[in-house]
Image (cartoon, rainbow, N blue to C red):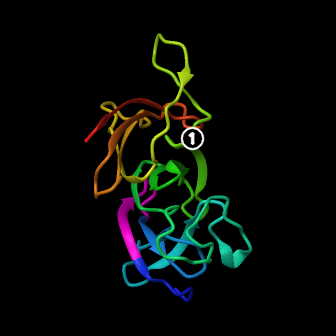
Amino acid sequence: NGHGSFGYHGMWVHLDGRGGRYVFASVRTTDYTDQILIIVDITNPADPHEVGRWWYPGMWHAGGETRTWPSDDGTPGQTGTPVQCHDVTVFGDRAYVAWPDKGVIILDISNPRTPTRVGEINWGDVSRPLAFPGKPAEPFHPIPSQVHSVGVVVPKHGGKVETVIAGDEVGRCPGGYMHIVDVRNEARPQEISSFMT
């Protein structure tokens, strides 16, 4: 791709409603601090080409961005920085991206050329309340947010996804908590339950 790619990690092939076929992949390039999301149009398999990308703000060091999270030594492009695109699941016009140290990112991919963040949840974020139906919100108890992968609960009768399940990678792959997340309010998803695997 002309940007010093180190290869890719997670990958999802998606057929959109207009007949286009796309690959969503976690790719590490030298222009960014770690793996980002790349979208490749493979509608014509003889001519695959990148059409879009998304990264967490602060990752594009070649573009002058500055990270807002701690690193081992601050070296741009450092291998092993935990803020990275790890894996992705696509359903309809949404991509649910596992982003270690930032949680689950929900992207609007109705136009794959310009993926747009519509929401995110990070269980390491101590600022958000934990609320369950019928109970008042209470302080959230943070845990490491090393999200490994994310899956969707496919709606029985079509429509939008209401629930996703995300797994951690805490100390081993996978290992840690499974998080059940209500995404009906995409701008502010809420964890509704979790359990230790």
Seen as rendered, the residue at the extreme right is: 64
Q: Amino acid at mark 1?
A: Asp
**Residue 196 found in image quarter:** top left
The segment highlighted magenta reads 8-20
- The local secondary structure at tag 1 comes to loop
- In the image, is residue 122 part of the stretch drawn in magenta? no
Question: As displayed, is residue 195 above or below residue 2?
Answer: above
- In the image, is residue 11 part of the stretch drawn in magenta? yes
Q: Position of residue 2 (x, y in %)?
A: 55, 89
Left or right position of 116 against 192: right
Q: Position of residue 3 (x, y in %)?
A: 56, 85
**Residue 66 found in image quarter:** bottom right
Residue at horizontal 33 percent and vertical 38 percent from the top: 153
Q: Main secondary structure of the magenta part?
A: strand
Left or right position of 56 against 155: right
Residue at horizontal 54 percent and vertical 37 percent from the top: 186
The quarter of the rendered structure image containing the C terminus is top left
Residue ID for mark 1: 125
Residue at horizontal 60 percent and vertical 45 percent from the top: 118
**Front residue of 188 and 83:** 83
